[in-house]
Image: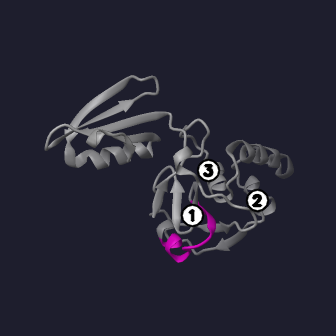
Amino acid sequence: MYKYYNPHPKGLSTDDCVKRAIITVTGRDYATVQRELNNYKKVTGAKAFNSVKNLRYVEDALGASKITLDGTLTADEFCKKHPRGRFILDMDGHWSACVDGCIYDTWDCGKEKVNFAYEVTTEPYTAPDLKKQVFKYCCTSEKISDGKARIRIYDGNGVFVERKIPAELTKGYVLCLQHSNYRYINLDGGKENEG
């Protein structure tokens, strides 16, 4: 299972997968994790917070246990084998979070192979609050006829681009926009609700 989750305080989509994974499995806030990773560079001598040397932070500071894998399991398969617990998954060039068998990330990396995982058990934990995410951009969809739908993509300043598309393609368009950090509002039925 996959759920979109971006804990960046400004809703930005950046190369911060290490921070996102740590935040998701610990319940810590973005600024705390950022500060701790940057301070940890002084201990490791690393040049970047997400360098291999600096990632020892997960074991040293969070007390996480490393799970060695053979690199054949996908993230989806790992989640199915671990329906309970909090894990950081290491994939080639990416970290993601698995909490109680669900991937929380800004994109669905379920098909990617997992090199190893960290299990985090020592932290008091608060589950990700998906409703408190900050979205920089927004998109809406509305059915305008039996076969047509209208998608509006807003830029954060109230300006939008409108596309009329076949109604059956709406779900795919919306999914692509959500993966690009757009908040989705379904306008069908005369009431706003998050899709």
**Front residue of 157 and 129:** 129
In 3D space, how far apart are the residues under numbered discs 3 and 2 (Cα atoms)?
16 Å
Q: Earlier in the sequence, mark 1 or mark 3?
A: 3
Position in image of residue 135 (x %, y %): 50, 38
Q: For marks 2 and 1, give the one nearer the viewer.
A: 1
The answer to whether marks 1 and 3 mark residues whose Cβ atoms lie closer than 8 Å is: no
Q: Which residues are magenta?
A: 77-91
Q: Amino acid at mark 2?
A: Arg
In 3D space, how far apart are the residues under numbered discs 1 and 3 (Cα atoms)?
11 Å
Is residue 189 inside the magenta stretch? no
Position in image of residue 10 (x %, y %): 59, 35
Position in image of residue 149 (x %, y %): 22, 39
Residue beneath disc 1 = 98
> Which quarter shows the N terminus?
bottom left
In 3D space, how far apart are the residues under numbered discs 2 and 1 (Cα atoms)?
19 Å
Graded by Cα atoms within 10 Å as few (under 14), some (14 to 19) or many (20 or more), the crowding at tag 2 reads: some
Above/below status of 162 relative to 109 = above
Q: Earlier in the sequence, mark 2 or mark 1?
A: 2
Disc 1 is placed on an element classified as: strand
Q: Residue furthest right?
A: 43
Which residue is rendered at x = 81% and y = 49% of the image? 40
Q: Amino acid at mark 1?
A: Cys
Q: Residue furthest left?
A: 146
Q: Quadrant of residue 127?
A: bottom right
Which residue is rendered at x = 86% and y = 51% of the image? 43
Position in image of residue 57 (x %, y %): 77, 57
Residue beneath disc 2 = 56
Disc 3 is placed on an element classified as: helix
The dot on residue 20 is 3
Above/below status of 85 relative to 34 = below
The answer to whether marks 3 and 2 mark residues whose Cβ atoms lie closer than 8 Å is: no
